[in-house]
Image (spheres, coloured by chain):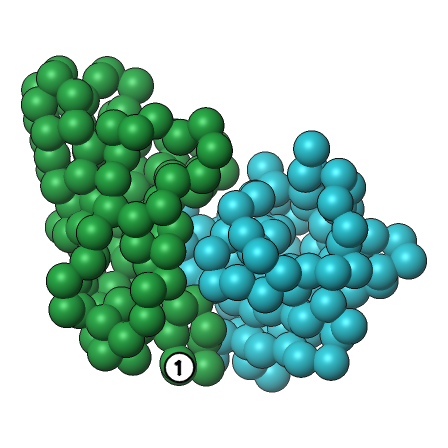
Chain colours: A cyan, B green
Amino acid sequence: QVQLVESGGGLVKPGGSLRLSCAASGFTFSDYYIYWIRQAPGKGLEWVSYISSSSSTISYADSVKGRFTISRDNAKNSLYLEMNSLRAEDTAVYYCARPLATSSSTVDSWGQGTLVTVSS
Amino acid sequence: QSALTQPASVSGSPGQSITISCTGTSSDVGGYNYVSWYQQHPGKAPKLIIYDVNKRPSGVSNRFSGSKSGNTASLTISGLQAEDEADFYCGSYTTRSTFVVFGGGTKLTVV
């Protein structure tokens, strides 16, 4: 079955950096767009970024543009999110998510999430 | 402020039906049949329960149904059960650069 496992979260000071990883299994990773979606404590879902199957198309939410970089390694079935210049408002659980169809806007598989806390 | 508008909370008694609305614009909900609904229990990842406005993934109870009229989509849960108590989020494709937009979420309480 589809499995997405995030790692790399933790406590970081404002202005700091963190790199999240997502290990995928149970499906042909290289066929799918993959998304990062976050959820601040007690808040709703916010789409953060997506990357196409071949990495040719990448998009970011305005709130992270210029600070976050998404990438993938299809040989390793892995997705990454490099986060720089972190702010308190980036504190959230970050989910790696797979769409229902290869590039659909509907998410049918989610990881368990990794918590990023930005605080001094 | 979320791009899609949902009521903050709804409640119902076991066996009753409830409906949660999700209002967007012609750039998202109203313009495309790519509305999805997610159920999230505390401490868990969201779970897809409705996609493409009114389709149910395999394994999802037929007590969950979706519909759309204009810029507003709706999720109806019939025959409420205690285990339905959770947060519900709508999502939609959007022509804006974000590609996907979500509602702010609705907390369902089964009293």
Q: Is residue A73 above or below residue A6?
A: below
Classify residue B104 as left or right of residue A57.
left
Chain name for mark 1:
B
Where residue B97 appears, x then y in whole percent? 46, 82
Q: Is residue A9 above or below residue B93?
A: above
Classify residue B5 as left or right of residue B55.
left
Q: Nearer the viewer, residue B50 or B87?
A: B50
Where is the N terminus of chain B found, in terms of image quarters?
bottom left
Q: Is residue A7 above or below residue B93?
A: above
Where is the C terminus of chain B found, in terms of image quarters?
top left
The reply to whether residue B8 is visible in this rendering is: no
* Quadrant of the rendered image containing residue A25: top right
Q: Nearer the viewer, residue A78 or A92?
A: A78
Q: Residue visible at 45% across and 75% down?
A: B98
Amino acid at dot 1 = Arg
Number of marks present in the image shown: 1
The reply to whether residue B13 is visible in this rendering is: yes
Residue at the far right in the pictured view: A75
Where residue A73 appears, x then y in whole percent? 84, 62
- Secondary structure category for the residue under label 1: loop
Where residue A90 appears, x then y in whole percent? 50, 62
Q: Which residue is mark 1?
A: B96
Where residue B33 appears, x then y in whole percent? 33, 64
Q: Residue visible at 66% across and 48% down?
A: A9
* Quadrant of the rendered image containing residue A72: bottom right
- Mark 1, residues whose alpha carbon is within 10 Å: few (<14), some, or many (≥20)? few
Q: Residue visible at 32% across and 71% down?
A: B32
